[in-house]
């Protein structure tokens, strides 16, 4: 029974990270109906920025206060990564606005290959690794026998995820720009006709998506501690799956999808075999799509006339 | 003529001129392709291989080369990917290079070796240990390293005789090398009466192993053998120790790399690794070790000396057989023995070494190792 709780903790941690990345896919899809395949690479870049910043702060400047390091790293990583998100939209997608759907998709794949190679040339193709900044945790359960372990890092991941998700939800629901985002996702042309600068809203979407991917990237470089230029691909596929599972275009859906995916991977490796964790995750996706083609929380798409 | 076609013409002309320049400057050298991962997650092993081969080429050239010709090492990157390995092998065929030292990973060596055999290119791998590579009945394929069916039993015997685990887990990375060796270990320990409770594969590039750690912890596993490379085992060690799972771990030479300590940190202390004997500790190699140290290189990596030896065997065979024809060289190598930094070597019919020993080392958190037996 205790190991069941441990698996829930493992799954939630993994799921939080998937959810943070999935938001970027879902927001962009919700507004311009495009899948931004370069989003996984954005996450990879942020993991690099996170790791390099932490190393620079601790080694170069001798900063020792962990909260300060976290705050600075998150800020720097969010700023730089958002700039990447914005620039990618500007360079690779905006010139193609209005062209058939397939064309920005191919541009996105090209961008993803470019970014992977760009980091590979700049930082080398090797693994970079870092020793944990935050170690330790709580143990529960009997002194001998199985003890549930909840690390400070896992709590941090959960807290940071909840904080940023709440902030995003509030931003979308309450602010002027958030309202503009929602309007764009309903009808881009009409919103434009009503005098809203839709290009700005789209830029903002990319920026927000990248910022959340940056949070995920920093958390991963802290939690896993080993990165290379290829981590964006797998994380991207998983997060995309999470977004589709929850209903692409829906922000709460992406969060739900991420958590479900994380938990199902965790339980599959625990109670079946580790080999089957991806099989189970993707079978779940197929099942959900069979019965709810728009995902768990997605709204059925009404063809607008 | 419009601008575009003028540009194309310009490019074409300069390309032709460049290639002519290349022809004019090409010296008559004996080219040896050294193929391994120069980039990618296991590039550290490629470093060892390139370092050993380049040192051999330098030293042989300093002694006047082979039959009056200089040797030239052509370093090629296959990223340890089977697909890339085949592309690289085709390139070697097209470039008419006749000798290959490589590849490094078993998964990439196997598909490439087929091409070399068909095209009559002499291949000596200093690192690929999967037994299947030399089971194909090829004449052109050799290796200057042991095989997993020697390494696996060494590890398995050590586990069964010295550790005697009650609940053992065997994990692997589902790759040719990792799974192959994991199966050998499982077979050996089971033959000696140790029960393997868990035999599972993880994915290459997987980053989160916490579920697996929890599973092993709750199954009371007290010893884990991992078949694969260091990036995954490093993370497994780190995440499992964090959860308070304190079983012993053991792995093959693919994990015995200083990067495992960079990834796992203190969790890498006490890891057991089977490696080729440390040839750099052999007094007969003192001069060679000094040459490496003068270059600021570390000769103690498992593939440095085998790689040096592979180049030297090719050179010695060319000198001994007085031909550069790779097919004649292959039969010369089959029949003769060679004095190399890994000892006096001779080959079996299938291209494997007649003798090769793996040793169990204990790994330390500061990336050093001490031999146990």
Image (cartoon, coloured by chain):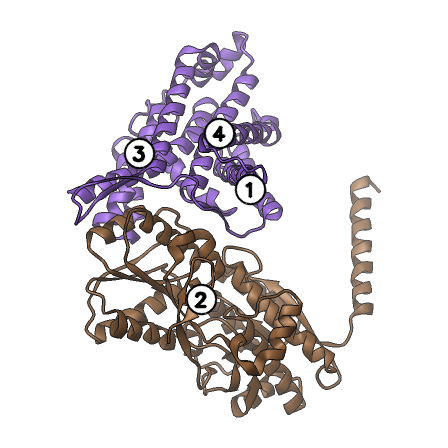
Q: Residue at x 27, y 35 (%)?
A: A288
Above or below — where is A167 with respect to A158?
Answer: above
Q: Which of the labelled discs sits on residue B311, or is there none? A: none
Which of pointers 4 and 3 indicates the residue nearer the eye?
4
Point 55% across, 40% down: residue: A52
Viewer-side residue, A231 vs B265: B265
Q: Residues within 10 Å of mark 3 (few under 14, many from 20)?
A: many
Per the image, the residue denoted by label 1 is A59
Task: Say whether mark 2 and mark 1 are on the same chain.
Answer: no
**Chain of the residue under the numbered disc 4 shown in the image:** A
The chain in purple: A
In the rendering, at what x and y percent does residue B281 appear? 52, 76
Residue A28 position in % (x across, y down): 47, 26
Chain letter of the residue carrying label 2: B
Of the pair B136 and A132, the residue shown nearer to us: A132
> SS for tag 3?
helix
Judging by the rendered image, the residue that carries numbered circle 4 is A68
- Structural distance between the alpha carbons of marks 1 and 3: 35 Å
Q: Is residue B34 left or right of residue A5?
A: right
């Amino acid at each position: 029974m205790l190991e069941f709780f441990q698996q829930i903790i493992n799954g939630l941690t993994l799921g939080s990270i998937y959810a943070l990345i999935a938001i970027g896919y879902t927001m962009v899809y919700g507004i311009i109906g495009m899948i931004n395949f370069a989003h996984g690479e954005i996450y990879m870049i942020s993991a690099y920025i996170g790791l390099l910043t932490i190393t620079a702060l601790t080694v170069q400047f001798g900063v020792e206060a962990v909260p300060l390091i976290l705050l600075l790293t998150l800020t720097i990583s969010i700023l730089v990564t958002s700039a990447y998100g914005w620039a990618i939209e500007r360079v690779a997608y905006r010139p193609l606005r209005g062209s058939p759907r397939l064309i920005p998709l191919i541009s996105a794949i090209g961008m993803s290959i470019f970014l992977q190679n760009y980091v590979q040339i700049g930082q080398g193709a090797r693994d970079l690794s870092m020793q944990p900044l935050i170690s330790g945790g709580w143990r529960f359960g009997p002194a001998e026998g199985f003890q549930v372990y909840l690390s400070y890092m896992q709590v941090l991941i959960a807290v940071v995820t909840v904080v940023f998700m709440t902030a995003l939800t509030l931003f979308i629901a309450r602010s002027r720009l958030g309202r503009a985002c929602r309007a764009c996702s309903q009808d881009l042309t009409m919103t434009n006709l009503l005098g809203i600068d839709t290009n700005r809203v789209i830029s903002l979407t990319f920026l927000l998506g990248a910022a959340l991917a940056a949070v995920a990237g920093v958390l991963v470089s802290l939690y896993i501690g080993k990165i290379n230029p290829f981590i964006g691909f797998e994380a991207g596929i998983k997060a995309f799956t999470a977004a589709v599972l929850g209903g692409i275009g829906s922000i709460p859906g992406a969060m739900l999808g991420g958590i479900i995916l994380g938990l199902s991977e965790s339980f599959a490796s625990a109670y079946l075999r580790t080999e089957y964790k991806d099989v189970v995750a993707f079978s779940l996706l197929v099942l959900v799509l069979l019965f709810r083609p728009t995902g768990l929380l997605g709204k059925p798409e009404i063809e607008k006339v | 003529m419009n601008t575009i076609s003028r540009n194309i013409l310009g490019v074409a002309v300069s390309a032709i001129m460049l290639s002519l320049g290349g022809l004019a400057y090409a010296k008559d050298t004996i080219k040896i392709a050294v193929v391994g991962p120069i980039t990618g997650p296991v590039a550290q092993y490629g470093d060892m291989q390139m370092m050993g081969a380049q040192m051999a080429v330098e030293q042989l050239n300093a002694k006047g080369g082979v039959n009056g010709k200089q040797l030239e090492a052509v370093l090629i990157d296959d990223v340890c990917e089977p697909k890339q390995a085949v592309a690289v092998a085709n390139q070697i065929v097209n470039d008419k290079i006749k000798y290959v030292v490589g590849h490094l990973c078993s998964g990439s060596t196997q598909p490439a070796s087929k091409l070399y055999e068909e095209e009559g290119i002499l291949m000596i791998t200093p690192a690929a240990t999967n037994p299947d590579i030399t089971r194909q009945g090829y004449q052109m394929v050799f290796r200057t390293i042991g095989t997993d069916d020697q390494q696996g039993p060494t590890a398995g015997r050590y586990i069964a005789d010295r550790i005697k685990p009650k609940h053992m887990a065997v994990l692997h990375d589902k790759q040719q090398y990792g799974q192959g060796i994991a199966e050998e270990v499982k077979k050996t320990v089971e033959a000696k009466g140790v029960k393997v409770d868990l035999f599972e594969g993880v994915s290459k590039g997987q980053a989160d192993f916490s579920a697996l750690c929890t599973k092993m912890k709750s199954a009371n596993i007290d010893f884990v053998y991992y078949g694969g490379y260091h990036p995954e085992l490093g993370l497994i060690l780190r995440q499992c120790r964090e959860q308070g799972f304190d079983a012993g771990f053991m792995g093959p030479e693919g994990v015995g790399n200083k990067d495992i300590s960079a990834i796992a940190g203190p969790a890498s202390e006490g890891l057991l690794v089977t490696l080729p004997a440390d040839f750099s500790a052999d007094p007969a190699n003192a001069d060679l070790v000094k040459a490496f140290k003068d270059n600021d290189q570390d000769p103690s990596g498992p593939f440095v000396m085998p790689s040096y030896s592979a180049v030297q065997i090719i050179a010695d065979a060319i000198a001994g057989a007085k031909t550069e024809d790779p097919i004649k060289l292959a039969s010369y190598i089959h029949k003769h023995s060679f004095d190399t930094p890994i000892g006096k070597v001779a080959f079996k019919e299938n291209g494997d070494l007649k003798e090769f020993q793996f040793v169990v080392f204990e790994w330390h958190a500061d990336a050093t190792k001490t031999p146990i037996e």
